[in-house]
Structures are given as C-alpha cells and as structure tokens.
Amino acid sequence: MERFVENIIHIAIKCRAFESLLYKKVELGLLKSPVYLSAGEEIPPATLSFLFQKIKPHIFAQHRGHSWYLSFGGNPRELIHELLGLESGCCRGMGGSASIHSPEINMFGHSGFMGDNIPIAVGAAFQTRHPTLAIAGDAAYEEDYALASLGWAATHNLPVAFVVMDNNFSILTPKSARRSWNLVDVARGFGIESFDIDDSPESVHSVFSNYQFSKPLLVNIHVTRKFWHAGAGTDESTPIDTLTRILDSPKLSELVVDYENQYNKLWEEALQ
Amino acid sequence: MTLRDKIKEVTKKHLQRGNSLFGQCLSAVGWVGNTIDPSSPNLVELSMADVAGGGFVVGASLFSRPIYVVRYQGFQWYNAITVCNYAAKSKAIWGRSCPIFIRSIAMEGAIGPVAGSSHHSIACRQPGIKVVSPMTPGEYEDVYCAFMGDDDPYYISEHRLSYTQSEETPALECSNPDWVVFPFSITRFAALEAAQRLQPDVNVTVYPQVWIKPTKFSENQILMLSESKYGGIVLDDDYAFGVASSIAHELMMLTNKKVHILALKDITAGFARRLDNLPPTADEIIDFIKKMTS
C-alpha cells in the first residue's frame, strides 16, 4: 500500500470510528434530534483533507457532513456536544447533525434546504477567489439552483470544486427513478472539467492531486451509504462500502476500536 | 436632490468601498430606473437564474456587504428564498452574519400578476431580517446608515413612483385627531393628500412609516392613536392579508383602539388597466374615512 493511501485510510478510520460509535449512541436513544451518519462515505473527505487541509479551503457541506468536519480537523468533542444539543457544541446546539459550522476549519453551516450550499459556495468563491468545496449528494445536485450554480461558476471561472457524493439515493429513491441524465454530462455542457469515479483512495487522489483551484471542477464520486438516511439502521441489500473492504484486516480493525475507545471517553465526559 | 439621485450616490459610495452590487439586467432598464451610476465599480450581472442568484449574493455576503437589486418585488418569491432561509438565520444559528442591502423595487399599473406591487411581507415572515420602506432622500440615507451600523440583512422596499421625490414628508399632526393613519411604502402620498382634503370636517393625523420590521412607533404616535376618536388605519402597497394585518394587530394591542387596513385586495391583477390591483388612492381613503366616520 502506498504511503499516501495509508495516510488517507488513517483519516478515514478516525471518521469510521466516530460514526460507528455514534451509531451505538443513537441506538441507545441518547440523541433527540435527527442524525445523518456518514459511514461508508469517509474516503472522499479523508482524501481531500489529505490534499487540501493546508490551504484551508472554504467548505460548504450539508447533512451527512460529520466526516468532512472530522477529516479537516474539526474538534470531535465539540461535535459530540453539538449532537447532544449542548451550548458547548460547535454550533451551540443550533446546528445539530445536519448543520455543522466551524470557523476554525473554514466550514460553513447549512440551512437544511438541500443543495442551497452550492450557490452559496459559488457566491463565496466569487467574492473571495479562495479555494472552495461545494459538497452535496447526487439528489441535492438535482436542485435547479445547483445546476444554475455550475453555469455561473463556469462563466466566471471560479475556484470551486463541486464534489458530488453519489450514493444513488434520495432517502430511498434511486437515481434511476429520478432522472435520465448524469451530472458529469451536464457539467461538461457548461464547460466544466468533470469526472465520474469510484471512491477508492487512489481514484479520488488521482483526480484531485493535480487540481489547483484555478477553475471549476466537478467530480461525481460513487459512494455507499452504509446506514439509513437518518438514524441507526441498515437498508436492505446495501453493498459493502470501500472502507469496510479495506478494513478487512485485524490490524486496521483494531485501530478502529482504539479510536472508538478514545471517542467514547469524550462521550462519557459529555454525558456527565 | 431626488431620491433617485440619493440612491445613486449611496450606491456608488458603497461600491467604492469594495462591495459589489448584484442584479439581473442592470443596464437593460435604464440602469434600474437611473438609480445606478454605470461608472460605479463592482457591478455584477447575475444570470437569469433567480433562485441561484440570491444564493450567490448570500455567499458573497459571508465576506462583504453586497447590494442585491431585484428589479420587480414580485420576483422576490424566487429571489428571496436563500436570503430568507440562510442569510436571515445565519447569525442566529452559526454566529456568522450576512449583511445584504436588498433593493426590492415596486411599481404597479398594467404590469400583470407577478411584477406589480410591493411584496415586503415575504421577508417579514422570517426572523433575522429587517424590512424598511424609505420614500425620501433623507429616509434612504438614514436606512443606509442603519444598515452600515448593523449586521443583519436589510430588505429595502422601494417604489419607483417615489424616485422623483426630493422633499421630506414629515408627519401631519392634528390635535384631537378623529383618525390616525399609518401609511407604509408609497401609500403615504395618498394619505397626506387625503388628510389635507378632509380638513376641516375630519381631523386626520398621518404618521409616514419607514420601519416595517421591526415597527418603530413612537410613544407619541401610540398616544395619539389611543386618544383618537375613531381609531387607526394601516395603509400598505402589499396585500391586506400580509404584514399590514400584523401591524394593525400590534397597534390594537398597544392601544385598545380599532385599527383598519387599506391595502391590496385579495385578488390577482391582470395586465389590462381595468384589472389592476392598486394601493389605496386618496379618493379611496377619503371615502373609507367618511363612511366609517358617519
């Protein structure tokens, strides 16, 4: 395994440990508001943080954003407190699982309207010309204003990477029931360089490692939502996700358990 | 100086400070009724994507104080979505303010069911946004100064018919008024005319209002309404079932006096003149007051 892949997997394992433990806490009924687990979708955030954390891009994510927050250095204690609705949470309890905000890592909160972080990210990029990540799912990218955002970013050649976390589902409705087109073709129609890839560390690294934020880019990454859309549970016939396959080794599995134990101390402290 | 010139002056000064002005078709309609100096820096043409355009401005407002021009207020039903649901809430949720100066421009008369009238009630429905309707140069300057000293988004409910206004319109006060009128937006001009024409038979006090949300009634205005013979009337260029109803309710709670509403009717306007849905005219205000007084 190449060194950069090891580093990416290590970041992803931290996220997996956080989400696996959170799953158990949700099952126990400790959380009173909706929780959107990002398990199964950890590798893209891990890879992009590995590549871009030093330039501190503006991050506009939405629900299922725990792994983006953690990968880019967000404080896990503050996220746990946020999930518990505490004043000491990263959004003082206002954001919950879906609307994480962290000035320390340049991560901006999300209102709850699917995909409205995409035009907001584009406007921020227009104003600042700072590297920007517009992260949303395959369904959120169907929003009319998301598509119009691709057009405006192309017109003004903005430094935005449109990251599509394509888990195929809008809650439980598959893409095939929603549309006959794909985003990569649409983005190319706007003149935006675009890729359709799997979520292996090598694939994600390959596409983004040469990206300098000198123009817009759209990358549709096929990921697997390991758990339910919201809450703790597993949909029928969910395929095995990429990170789970990678973790099929005693050494890496032990590492997940080690991190779970570390996070559990934070949970115990918060619950006290 | 006319209101038009004041807007042009304020806008240019704001843009020279490094802020941007965003809008659709900025040059196409005579530079927004000649309220924008085309030589101003940082003028940004948006695409015709109304909803996304509002989102772009909100994104810019995370790092600056943009002006957002929406050339017909009715277009706010699309354009205001991200302003109302992100910019207005951002400070409360994340402690990050989105100070946008939203120039929302009204006009009416033979312009159909969407483009006409004021629609400031949309913005009033959300917490975290301030709504004003300056109709004179002095009021516009005051509102701009308030915006610059604040970090909330401001919805400026403008009206094209006021752009030629150069005089201030102070309150018209009568001792022992029969009626106290609280006009918003363009309705103040009809209210002032009606009050003068009703003299000396009916004493009508008129308090032109700039602040729609939050309302800013002075103690004296409330006292005058409390002591009026018949009560109050709220006038608006938005629908009667919009914020005018809320304001009338607020005034009634403050005074125990009946407060009526004269505003747009609950009907859809058409393009033919005979199918307009217009704000109350001086004649209509006079007829209403005479009817209620008798």
Image (spheres, coloured by chain):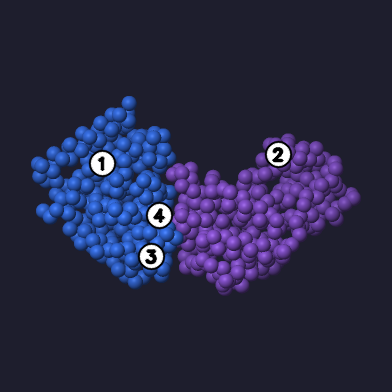
Chain colours: A blue, B purple
Which is more toward the observer, B71 or B259? Answer: B71
| Same chain check for tags 4 and 1 | yes
How far apart are labels 2 and 4 at the CA level? 41 Å
Task: Name the residue: 35% across, 35% down.
Answer: A81
Displayed quadrant of residue B93: top left
Mark 4 or mark 3: which is in front? Answer: 3
Residue A106 rendering spot, x and y as whole percentages: 37, 50
Task: Name the residue: 66% across, 53% down.
Answer: B142
Mark number displayed over residue A117: 4
| Same chain check for tags 4 and 3 | yes
Question: In the rendered image of this protein, does residue B288 appear above or below residue A150?
Answer: above
Looking at the image, the residue that sits furthest to the right is: B200
Mark 2 lies on a secondary structure that is helix
Q: Amino acid at mark 3?
A: Leu
Mark number displayed over residue B252: 2
Q: Amino acid at mark 4?
A: Asn
How far apart are labels 4 and 3 at the CA level? 15 Å
Q: Is residue B155 left or right of residue A171?
A: right
What is the chain letter for disc 2? B
Mark number displayed over residue A158: 3
Task: Name the residue: 17% across, 36% down.
Answer: A258
